[in-house]
């Protein structure tokens, strides 16, 4: 209020809150329910502060209309609870964006222009030419190299640098923070493309030059994923090539990242990929949703046990125990038939059971409420692959309490979204790097048997999820 809007202390707080709301509405990905916990010191913002409720300038109906369109739901017939909850989330996310992106020494009006107005033109990814300042910066840092190739990606501008002396690689990696400071960009990352004396520098473009990665762009990749037993399409790599993998070979997946990093969107990409290519007699889900809202869009699907996500953690613990019993039953039947795994069973006979994918939206909540739930998860992680049972575990708290050593060891495939510290990145990936990610679905995927890969996860809107669910129901006649 004082430094940005230059407002008198007696001015209404809603000026700042409405700026925060505008910033949040300019983002494609809906704010997660994690912002329900980001309470201000005084509790909820009052309707008078936010909407001008009861005053001459009452914007309540305008905000209902905006959020109804944004979330694709009717918030006029809804009670104030749902509307108020969503409005508070947007405001808190906007305030979080300001805290993270703006400093008091920066021009606030320029910040608003870049964040709001310059984002309006979102066509193809804009190419940002860093070549000249990059070469000057390398000379300044004492690194002798020449640019061999430049690639314009959705969020990153990549440069293949041919080093005059291979021993300068370490110097270049150590100088990454100084290089970003000279160029005025976000964190710069490096990787080896496999060409002698060549290192690829991936330089983040300003957000105004980002190209969104939408779910509809991945239709071709979803067709390609049909050839895999459990094909999943995550998004695209830094040069825009679709990234896919086979969950059956993973065979279990950990997805971790801080609040608002895009973790939930990544989970939806996994679920929607599998739903797009499998019928209910080929694939079943057990969706465990401690937050009670993230998987609600899948309610009623015939692919789900009981046709609904599990939101009660006592029921979730019992469901995991039941799945362990199902795993043991399948193992017994595999031994009787003389098959090594479910893939062989499905190839040789028509009476094989479906694949079963267990998704836990927030592992930390499950473990805190029911620590004994770790035992069946470990059993499934150790032995579930042969019987066609696979785990997808997500958490925003990648610590030793949530992820014991035994569980981490048996979940070999990892997707790390943005985290705050390098130590958290090492817990997820056994390596640093996730602390340098850009947020909003930017990820590092370390799949079993493959090197770590940068991925921009596709944004899946509520309408996209509804379309996938409607298509799955139509195919099964549900």
Image: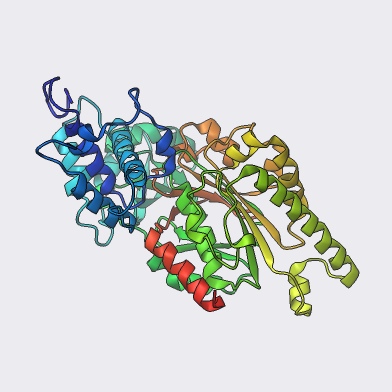
Q: Residue at x 25, y 38 (%)?
A: 20
* Residue 140 x, y percent position in the rendering: 30, 33
**Type of colouring:** rainbow
Residue 198 visible in the picture? no
Q: Is residue 213 left or right of residue 426?
A: left
Residue 391, above or below 214? above
Decide if residue 13 is on the left or right side of residue 144: left
Residue 176: quadrant of the picture:
top left
Quadrant of the drawing holding the C terminus: bottom right
Position of residue 189 in the picture relative to residue 65 (left or right)? right
**Residue 412: image x %, image y %?**
66, 49
Question: Which of the 4 quarters of the picture holds residue 408?
Answer: top right
Residue 149 picture location, percent across and down = 36, 57
- Which of these two is toward me, 376 or 104? 376
Q: Is residue 281 visible?
A: yes
The quadrant in which the N terminus is found is: top left
**Left or right, residue 349 beside residue 312:** right
Q: Nearer the viewer, residue 85 or 403?
A: 85
């Amino acid at each position: 209020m004082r430094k940005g809007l230059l407002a008198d202390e007696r001015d209404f707080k809603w000026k700042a809150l409405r700026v925060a709301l505008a910033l949040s509405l300019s983002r494609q990905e809906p704010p997660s329910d994690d912002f329900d916990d980001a309470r201000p010191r005084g509790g909820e913002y009052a309707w008078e502060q936010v909407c001008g409720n009861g005053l001459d300038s009452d914007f309540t109906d305008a905000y209902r209309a905006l959020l109804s369109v944004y979330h694709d739901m009717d918030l006029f017939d809804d009670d104030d609870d749902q509307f108020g909850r969503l409005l508070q989330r947007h405001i808190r996310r906007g305030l979080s964006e300001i805290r993270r992106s703006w400093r008091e020494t920066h021009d606030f009006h320029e910040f608003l222009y870049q964040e709001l107005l310059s984002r309006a033109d979102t066509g193809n990814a804009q190419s940002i030419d860093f070549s000249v300042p990059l070469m000057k910066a390398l000379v300044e840092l004492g690194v002798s190299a020449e640019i061999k190739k430049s690639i314009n990606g959705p969020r990153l501008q990549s440069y293949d640098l041919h080093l005059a002396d291979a021993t300068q690689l370490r110097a270049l990696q150590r100088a990454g923070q100084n290089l970003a400071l000279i160029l005025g960009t976000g964190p710069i990352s490096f990787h080896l493309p496999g060409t002698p004396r060549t290192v690829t520098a991936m330089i983040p473009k300003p957000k105004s030059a980002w190209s969104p990665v939408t779910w509809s762009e991945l239709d071709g990749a979803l067709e390609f994923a049909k050839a895999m037993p459990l094909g999943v399409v995550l998004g695209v790599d830094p040069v825009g090539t679709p990234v896919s993998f086979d969950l059956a070979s993973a065979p279990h997946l950990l997805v971790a990242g801080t609040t608002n990093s895009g973790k939930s969107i990544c989970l939806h990409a996994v679920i929607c990929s599998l739903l797009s290519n499998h019928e209910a007699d080929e694939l079943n889900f057990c969706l465990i949703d401690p937050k009670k809202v993230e998987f609600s869009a899948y309610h009623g699907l015939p692919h789900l046990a009981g046709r609904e996500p599990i939101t009660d953690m006592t029921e979730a613990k019992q469901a995991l125990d039941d799945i362990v019993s199902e795993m043991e039953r399948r193992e017994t039947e595999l031994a009787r038939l003389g098959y090594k795994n479910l893939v062989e069973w499905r190839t040789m006979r028509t009476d094989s059971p479906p694949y079963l994918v267990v998704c836990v939206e927030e592992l930390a909540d499950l473990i805190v409420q029911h620590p004994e739930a770790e035992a069946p998860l470990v059993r499934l992680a150790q032995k579930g692959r042969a019987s066609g049972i696979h785990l997808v575990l997500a958490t925003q708290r990648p610590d030793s309490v949530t992820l014991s050593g035994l569980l981490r060891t048996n979940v070999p495939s990892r997707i790390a979204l943005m985290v705050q510290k390098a130590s958290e990145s090492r817990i997820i990936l056994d390596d640093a790097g996730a602390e340098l990610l850009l947020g909003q679905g930017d990820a590092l995927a370390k799949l079993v048997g493959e090197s770590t890969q940068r991925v921009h996860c596709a944004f899946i809107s509520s309408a996209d999820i509804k379309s996938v669910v409607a298509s799955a129901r139509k195919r099964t006649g549900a």
